Amino acid sequence: MAVLRPARLSVNINKVATLRNSRGGNVPNVLEVAARAQDFGAEGITVHPRPDERHIRYADARALRAVVRTEFNIEGYPSRDFIDLVLECAPEQVTLVPDAPDVLTSNAGWDTLKHASMLQQVLAEFRTAGIRTSLFMECNFAHIKAAKELGSDRIELYTEAFAQGYQAALALRDGGDQAGFDRLRTAAVQPYADAAELAHSLGLGVNAGHDLNADNLAFFAASVPQLDEVSIGHALIADALYLGLENSIQRYRYQLELGAQQALF
């Protein structure tokens, strides 16, 4: 019988740092949360240090290098300061995002044609350092093809549109329209399934993140069997307030396993 390995779960701990920074001091301790998260089943730790350090700080990223024993993923816009931080920390993966410094959260993927020259240089610098690279992308075939040509190892699919479509589908199901639910959630995921299939055919790894949660994750994973990794922070940390961190991580791991099983049928 065929076996499909579930996608890896990388836990984004930015929200933990946001809570710490709201009060000052070092509670909650992001290093301890990262260590506990891995004890509880997280297969990676993700951080996104921004220039204003409103959540994860550059100093946090440096300190986390000694704590992360699974895979360390650092996200960010490739300013010179960010590039130098990543080279210093030597994470297993760097995910480049096209965020402006003042953006609240990542809200668009790279235009890899418009920014080709800059991205090619940055990707080459990380490749020379032995760091796996990923570009935050929308489901644009031309941009995905360019990502491969520029030398990226992976793409991370920006999943907000899927999450919004799935939420709309849930409203139909809750209203008793099962056929409408199935139709709308399939329409929401199809661009991602097509984009992942293209990326896989080009030899690119496929990650995903943004607004994935315990409700939509299994369906997404089942529909995108090429999925290597998901990075989830906001929803998982929010669920941990109700369920506890260990239960929350195990719940998301189970959803990924369920998705892998469903993808076989």
Image (cartoon, rainbow, N blue to C red):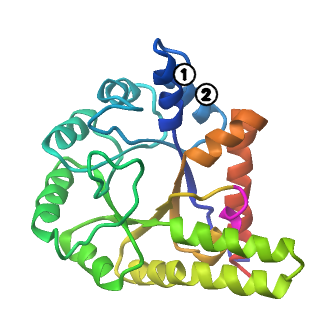
Vertical side of 35 occupied by 25: above or below: above
Tell me, yes or no, whether the highlighted magenta stretch contains residue 161.
Answer: no
The region drawn magenta spans 214-219
Sort mark 2 into few (<14), some (14-19) or many (20+) by Cα contacts within 10 Å.
Answer: some
Quarter of the image with the C terminus in it: bottom right
Query: Residue 41, can we see it?
Result: no
Q: Which residue is mark 2?
A: 36
Vertical side of 50 occupied by 257: above or below: below
x 34%, y 81%: residue: 202
Q: Amino acid at mark 1?
A: Glu
Tag on residue 32?
1
Sort mark 1 into few (<14), some (14-19) or many (20+) by Cα contacts within 10 Å.
Answer: few
Query: Residue 25, can we see it?
Result: yes
Residue 187 point in image, percent of width and height: 62, 85
Residue 47 point in image, percent of width and height: 41, 40
Q: Amino acid at mark 2?
A: Arg
